[in-house]
Image (tube, rainbow, N blue to C red):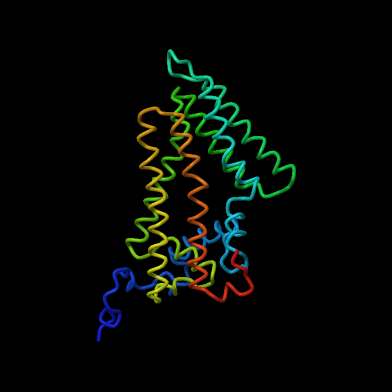
Amino acid sequence: MSAADARGNDPHETAADDEPDAARDAGQPAASELIGAALGGAARRAGLDPAQATSTGHLVWRAMGGWRGILESVLPTLVFIVVWTVTVDPATGQGNLWLAVGLSVGLAVVFTLARLIGRSPAAAALGGLIATAAAAGLALWTGRAADNFILGLVTNGAYGTAALVSALIGWPLIGLAVGWLMNDGTAWRQDARKRRVFFWLTIGWAGLFALRLAVELPLFLTDQVTALGTLKLIMGLPLFAPMVAVTWLAVRGLYPKADAGASDV
């Protein structure tokens, strides 16, 4: 009986399942291990570690960064939207772009400095500052307020495409990250249930990014700045949080030992 016959007809398996692991045989890390380590490390820094016993609500709250993380994520964009909308000239339909981006970037600077002064992890705030400043610079350069949101659109497109492709070729990104976090490596690919769950979780994340892009891109192309910024906020943390919760609960179901002592609140 061939290996393919023994495996059966699993829609989530691909020819990649049979590829030789030459890199590991040569004592070098495989590409999947490097990607898993990068994704898993980022997830762990964000507080998303299935190996830690914690409640679902607490984990989601940590993933969002608590109140500080929420403010850092929401306020710069909110200030930009409010200032732009309030200063719009009815005759031209244009607001005060310099004031809007100036206050938005200023808030991001304040959040970053507050973390540095308090000696708390500043990576997220610093990343937010760089992204906010880059988007503001692009908007000022083009003179088009909607360009303040173009980096978010590109990011959603890139993340969504990466997630979708990884799932379709049999190496879902969620599986790679969880495999690294749980010291499972790529052994989960030999478990049909885990492979199926990781496939659909990754598809779910790809769908989230695609939904954001589908809603926001038409508004970007038609220069509807206020609507674009508002929907970016609505489709940000409010959709991110339940996706994190679903992912966490699914992973806990696959690795019940990691759930020992945790209260599901």
- The residue closer to the viewer here, 22 or 5, is 5
Residue 129 in percent (x, y) is at 59, 38
- Above or below: residue 61 compared with residue 175: above
Could you tell me which quadrant the N terminus lies in?
bottom left
Residue 23 in percent (x, y) is at 42, 69
- Above or below: residue 234 compared with residue 246: above
Residue 251 in percent (x, y) is at 49, 68
Q: Residue at x 37, y 37 (%)?
A: 217
Outermost residue on the front side: it is 265
- The residue closer to the viewer here, 37 or 237, is 237
Outermost residue on the top side: it is 91
- The residue closer to the viewer here, 264 or 59, is 264
Q: Is residue 180 left or right of residue 223?
A: right
- Total numbered circles: 0
Q: Residue at x 40, y 74 (%)?
A: 193
Q: Residue at x 40, y 47 (%)?
A: 158
Q: Residue at x 39, y 53 (%)?
A: 206
Outermost residue on the right side: it is 118
Q: Is residue 87 left or right of residue 93?
A: right
Q: Kindly indicate the quadrant of the structure image that contains residue 46.
A: bottom right
- The residue closer to the viewer here, 22 or 38, is 38
Could you tell me which quadrant the C terminus lies in?
bottom right
Q: Kindly indicate the quadrant of the structure image that contains residue 61.
A: bottom right
Residue 150 in percent (x, y) is at 43, 35
